[in-house]
Amino acid sequence: ATPMSIMVASGRGARAGVLFRDAAAIERLRDVDTLVFDKTGTLTEGKPVLVDVRTFGYERAKALAFAAAVERPSEHPLAAAIVAAAEAEGIAIPAVSGFQVVVGSGVSGTVDGHDVALGNARLMEAERVEAGAAHDVAEKPRSKGATAMYLAVDGRLAAMLSLADEVKPSTKPALDALHAAGVRLVMATGDNEATARALASSLPIDEVHAGVSPEDKARLVAALKTKGATVAMAGDGVNDAPALAAADIGIGMGNGSDIAIQSASVTLLKGDLAGIARARALSEATVRNIR
Ligand code: ADP
Ligand code: MG
C-alpha cells in the first residue's frame, strides 16, 4: 500500500480504537484465515467474582485468608477477585513470603509458616497434591463455565474455589462476523477443559484447546502456521505473550497486561473482539485500493 493509504488507514483505525504498530500489520490482517484467542479477559470480561468455596477440613475464613495471602502480590484477574472477596468478608489477610508465580497455572508462597499453593490441576500435580476430591466438587461449577481453582496447604488439599466471569456482550457478534467472513476460530486457554467447552458451546468456535501452558499456546500457533494458515492471535495476559509473538499478527487487548500489548502488532483499545472485524475490513479496503 502507498504511504498515503497507510496513513489514512491508521487514522481510521485509531478512531475506531484499533492501533496498528506498522504498515505491515495493516496489510497482513486481511490475509488472516485463523484467529486464536484466549478465554479469560479476551472472550470474558476478565472480572471474575468468587461464587463458591468448598473446604476440606478447613474453615471457610481460614481457607480464604490463605488464598488471599498468596494472591495479593499477583496481577492475575483471578487474584484480584479472591483478595476482594476476602476483604468484603472482613477477613484479615496475612503476609506472604517466598511468593512465586507459575504463569498459566497459579501462585504459591509461605503464609504463617505454612506452604500454600493455589491454582489449577497442573499446579497440584507439580506440587504432588492429591486433588481428587476437588475434581469432583469442581465438576458442577465447570459445567456452567466457571473457573475452579485448588488451594493446597502443606501439600494437602484444603479447598476448591470457583469464580464466574461473564462473556463480554461484544464477543458473540464479533465472532459471528469473523466466522461469516470465513475465519477459523480457535480458543486456547490455560483453564480446564469442561469450563472451556461450557463457555464455547454458545459461541461459533471451531476448536477448543484447554489446559494449555503459555508455551503450548505458542506451539499451537506455530503448528497452525506450518499447516499453511495465516494466524492472528488475540490475548490479554502475560501468559499470552509467547503466542502473540509467534503469530503472523499479534493482537493485544488494550485492557490487558503491558507485556501482552508490547508483544502485539495490533492493539484493541476498547479491549473487545469487535475491533478485529473492523480492523480486518480496514485492511481489506486499504490493500484493495492500491492493488
Ligand atoms: P487464560 O488462558 O484463559 O487467559 P490463564 O492461562 O491466565 O488463563 O490461567 C489458566 C489457569 O491457571 C486459570 O484458569 C487458573 O486455574 C490458573 N491460574 C493462573 N493464574 C492464577 C492465579 N494467579 N491464581 C490462581 N490460579 C491461577
Ligand atoms: Mg487471558
Image (cartoon, rainbow, N blue to C red):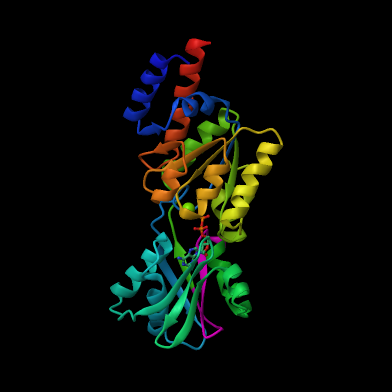
Residue 150 lies within the magenta run: yes
Relative to 36, is 94 above or below?
below
Q: Position of residue 158 (x, y in %)?
A: 51, 82
Q: Quadrant of residue 60?
A: bottom left
Residue 50 lies within the magenta run: no
Q: Magenta region's main secondary structure?
A: strand
Q: What is the residue that sits farthest to the right in this orientation?
A: 227
Relative to 125, is 24 above or below?
above
Q: Position of residue 218 (x, y in %)?
A: 60, 48
Task: Give the number of marks.
Answer: 0
Q: Position of residue 115 (x, y in %)?
A: 49, 83
Residue visible at 30% across and 81% down? 92
Residue visible at 32% across and 79% down? 93
Can see residue 38?
no
Residue visible at 59% across and 69% down? 121
Compared across the picture, whether 196 is left or right of 51 comes to: right
Can see residue 152?
yes
Numbered range of the magenta stretch: 143-160
Q: Position of residue 46 (x, y in %)?
A: 41, 54
Q: Quadrant of residue 8?
A: top left
